[in-house]
Image (tube, rainbow, N blue to C red):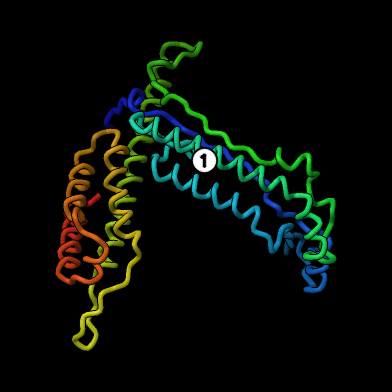
Amino acid sequence: MTRYNIDTCALLVELNVSQWTARKLDRSTTDELVSNKHAQAKGAARVNKHLLAGRTELEVVNKHVGETRQYVLDNTLPWSDSGIRLLPSTKFMEFNGKLQQAEDKFYGLVAEFVLIYPSLITAQAMALGDMFNRDDYPQPDDISHRFRFNANYMPVPASGDFRVDIGNDAQIELKTKLSALADQRVENAMDSFKRRMVDHLARMSDRLSIDYVSGEAKPRVFHDSLLHTAHELCDWAKDLNIINDPSIEEARKALKGAINGIDLKDLRKDVGARTEVKTQVDDILSKFAF
């Protein structure tokens, strides 16, 4: 296995966001449903109440958190099963700035929600009917504590810094295993990005295809994101290629060349331009068999 030294060119980031879900198990309704359906097995069904059903105030917070998580996924690489991500050092200032903005917006949205929270409880008494239970809702002075936003940064562990009070032979073996684990994680991270590239290139190839019905050309429909994401991939490939994989860089250059100067109108209206881009995309897919 190739040995990668990335502890000086990357760092680890972990985003932890907690939110009040506004969901609550309704035991009485669950028991009623199970009884009415004559189910014998314990736990055959669960009825969860949406405590803010019909309201959108909390959904605004949820949407922002989802967009923030997607930003983290797009601009980092996978590192561990616990959700820790690998961030190239060159992206730290931009990335950290974005997360600080996201954190400020998060707490701003939470403050707006907390302000109207007592009135929402009153409104839900009618909306939920017999399912309403005031005890399901946290107290107004407690609700803000149900929301937390925290981003932690950590250095990538270097096997040479491993210290523990064990015998030399055991320490050498542990260092070897840690190095192998780190190298495997780097390879997994890069494979993940390669799959991201391949998936989008395959999507481009499919959506840029032209079907012929009774001899008439029928270009397939695609969203604006098809081209926008391709440009983003080219940008991400420059930053996320932390081991300078030549195949990723060559594929990036080829994709950039294929879409450079092309706009959405060209792809939708000009069959020749559409066919040319698709041909180049297919060439990238066949040449760089990630």
SS of the residue at dot 1?
helix
Q: Amino acid at mark 1?
A: Ala
Q: Is residue 177 above or below residue 197?
A: above
Residue where numbered disc 1 is placed: 102
Q: Which residue is rendered at x = 83% and y = 68% of the image?
A: 32
Query: Can you tell which quarter of the image residue 71 is in?
Result: top left
Q: Relative to residue 138, is residue 93 depicted above or below?
A: above
Front residue of this view, candidates 26 and 95: 95
Residue 221: quarter of image: bottom left
Residue lying at 52% horizontally and 30% vertically, measured from the top left? 152
Q: In the figure, is residue 247 to the left or right of 35? A: left
Residue 216's x, y, as percent? Answer: 20, 84
Eyeballing the image, is 217 above or below 111? Answer: below
Place of residue 53 in the rendered image (x, y in percent of width and height, measured from the top left): 70, 62
Judge whether 170 appears above or below 154 on screen.
above
Residue ID at (16%, 51%)? 257
Quadrant for the N terminus in the image: top left
Residue at horizontal 74%, vertical 43%?
143
Q: Count up the numbered dots.
A: 1
Task: Estimate the x, y position of residue 85 in percent, counting from the top left.
Answer: 44, 37
User: In the rendering, at what x and y percent does residue 15 appear?
Assistant: 52, 37
Estimate how packed mark 1 is, as few (under 14), some (14 to 19) or many (20 or more) residues with alpha carbons within 10 Å. Answer: some
Left or right for 165, reference 228: right
